Image (tube, helix red, strand yellow):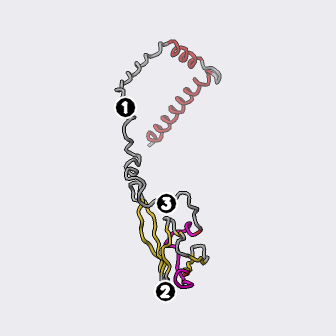
């Protein structure tokens, strides 16, 4: 039984002695003594530098000269103007009216006043103000010109782009709200 308790104690003592010896060696060299490190650094600096890889060869690209300056531009509206200026077009010099700032579907017709040629429609705009609308006025955001005012509705003609540089007339109307 004594043998079993003696062996671990002896092994622990040996390990402690080895540890003390190792620590003693580093202590003897002193905390400011870096001679081994300085020797190693000097030795590494004396070695020749490793050879660098050669620079990669730049790939030569085929040059291209653009020679289509005189040809027709595929993104221009050249074909839209071939038919002349016939057809409807918005007047760029016309002053925009107050009711053209709102979308056409945001108006509510609430009634009309008068009869015949002097008939005026009453509409409420999104700004919650009631406006008088007569034939010839413009409203909506698509150049909508009022063509007729009746008791039950307002008829308009809007100008919309046709996608090829021209304009199309599109009929539209605002009906009286039955509440």
Q: Secondary structure at mark 1?
A: loop
Q: Which mark, residue 178? A: 2
Q: Residue furthest right?
A: 32
**121 relative to 4 in the view: left or right:** right
Q: Residue 48's x, y, as percent?
A: 47, 12
Q: CA distance from mark 2 to mark 3?
A: 34 Å
Of marks 1 and 2, which one's residue comes earlier in the chain?
1
Pick whichever, 83 or 29, lies toward us: 83
Q: Secondary structure at mark 3?
A: loop
According to the picture, the residue beneath numbered tag 1 turns out to be 67
Of marks 3 and 1, which one's residue comes earlier in the chain?
1
Q: Splitting the image into 4 quarters, where does residue 134 fall?
A: bottom right
Name the residue located 52 percent from the left edge and 14 percent from the top edge.
43
Q: CA distance from mark 3 to mark 1?
A: 38 Å
Of marks 2 and 3, which one's residue comes earlier in the chain?
3
According to the picture, the residue beneath numbered tag 3 turns out to be 90
The magenta region covers 99-117
């Amino acid at each position: 039984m004594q043998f079993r308790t003696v062996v671990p104690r002896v092994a622990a003592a040996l390990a402690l002695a080895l540890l003390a010896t190792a620590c003693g060696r580093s202590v003897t060299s002193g905390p400011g003594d870096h001679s081994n490190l300085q020797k190693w650094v000097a030795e590494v600096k004396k070695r020749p530098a490793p050879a660098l890889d050669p620079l990669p060869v730049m790939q030569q690209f085929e040059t291209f000269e653009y020679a289509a300056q005189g040809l027709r531009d595929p993104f221009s509206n050249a074909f839209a103007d071939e038919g002349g200026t016939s057809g409807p077009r918005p007047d760029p010099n016309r002053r925009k009216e107050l009711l053209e700032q709102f979308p056409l579907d945001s108006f509510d017709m609430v009634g009309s006043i008068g009869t015949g040629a002097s008939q005026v429609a009453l509409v409420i705009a999104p700004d919650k103000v009631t406006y008088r609308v007569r034939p010839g006025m413009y409203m909506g955001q698509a150049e909508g010109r009022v063509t007729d005012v009746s008791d039950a509705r307002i008829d308009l003609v809007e100008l919309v782009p046709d996608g090829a540089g021209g304009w199309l007339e599109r009929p539209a109307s605002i009906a009286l709200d039955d509440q």
